[in-house]
Image (spheres, grey):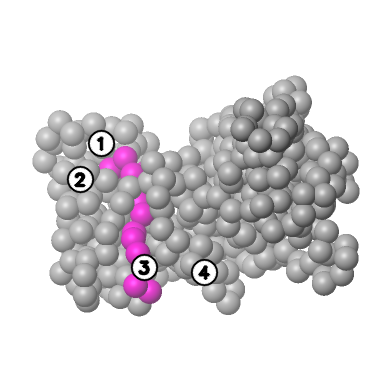
Amino acid sequence: MTAPLHEPRPSGRGRALPDTQQGMRRRNLARVMHTVSAEGPLSRAAVASRIGLTRAAVSTLVDELVRSGLLEELGPERPRRVGRPGSALTVSGSGPAGVGAEVGVDHLAACVVDLRGRVRARAMRHGTNRGRPAEPVAKDLTVLIAQVVAEAEGQGLRPAGLAVAVPGLVARDGRTVVRAPNLDWHDTDLAALLPGDPAPVVDNEANFGALAELWLGDGTPHDFLHVSAEIGIGGAVVVDGRLLRGTRGFAGELGHMPVEPEGPTCPCGGRGCLEQYAGEEAVLRAAGLAPGEGGVGLLATRAAAGDDAARRSLREAGTALGTALTGAVNLLDPEAVVLGGALAELAPWLMPSLEAELARRTSGAACPVSVSRLGPQGPLLGAAHAVLRAVLDDPAAVAERR
């Protein structure tokens, strides 16, 4: 189930519903969907009690949502002492579904998630995308998307939209990859290269990872910094349950914060960026491993076995992470820092030096650091769940497209 938080679609194209009878109806449909999604199964009477509408009004809304395939009736609740048992409602397990996709530097992935939050289809393709033009990458990703959509449709699901996570800066239009240094993409309209009606929504992978943590994490606070790693390092800021996007949509770009002003040159054009000290390739090199030689898994295995070079590389990466995070923690005062992506697997050896650096450099009480249980799956799941949030926020739009 998803939490009843109203995060706008990543593209920022969400429209406010007008203050008309039709607009009120759409808002009330959304309230019913969010309530059943978060707390169901519930009877119509229970929904009415929670959202403050009459049972008759809720019954009309529920009938519309059942006809649209968004809600299902499970049959009578357990008998109560007084009155007739109500029919329990739940979100549909065979209706609209969210399609998520991810472009990584060394992989492509796609999945389909139903309204109950279950992953119903998943596919992945390994292979470098570094330096490949966007067109062939999008073509390969389209094949994966078609594969998972066909599998999901065979289970009675219908796609409600597509959202795509990328390792780069994405404009607020939710389409254009402005800059992805590790892919060597610039001003690329990725949405135009992918299938979808409505058009796909594109966003930074760290943003989707943070949203997945917010919606699916166990006890995640509503104010936190999310840090993830693949080849590069991404960051996202969540304030009061919403992403902080910034004027251009680039907020949270932690990987290119300088930790050594005269350090090595970064693909972004800067020097001494965090990625050059704590990114996957940098940590592997420091441990004496070639990029692609077993990757993070081999590094973790060696660190667990007590390999000095592996542990030293991770200790130094943790120090660099702590240095970069210090400024953000002092500026934003979050409740927590959450490590996701590849950092989650390496956390046992990163955390001591990271936490020590944060404690040494931050003012006031130390900011707690936790590890995401979603790990590398966060961005892909966040993308799929972003589509589902759009369904919950405006279920009438889904019905109109049928």
Q: Label 3 to label 2, Cα distance in Å?
A: 23 Å
Identity of the amino acid at label 2?
Answer: Trp
Does 219 sit left or right of 358 as displayed? right
Residue 388 pos. (x, y %): 66, 46
- Which stretch appears magenta? 332-346
Identity of the amino acid at label 3?
Answer: Pro
- Mark with earlier residue (4, 1): 4
For the residue labelled by badge 4, is the local secondary structure a helix, a strand or a loop? loop
- The mark lying in front, picked from 3 and 1, is 3
- Mark with earlier residue (4, 3): 4
Q: How many C-alpha atoms fall within 10 Å of the one at disc 4: few (<14), some, or many (≥20)?
A: some
Query: Marks 2 and 1: in contact by CB < 8 Å?
Result: yes
For the residue labelled by badge 2, is the local secondary structure a helix, a strand or a loop? helix
Query: Marks 2 and 4: in contact by CB < 8 Å?
Result: no
For the residue labelled by badge 3, is the local secondary structure a helix, a strand or a loop? loop
Q: Residue 62: give its label.
A: none
Q: Residue lying furthest front in this view?
A: 82
Does 112 sit left or right of 250 as displayed? right
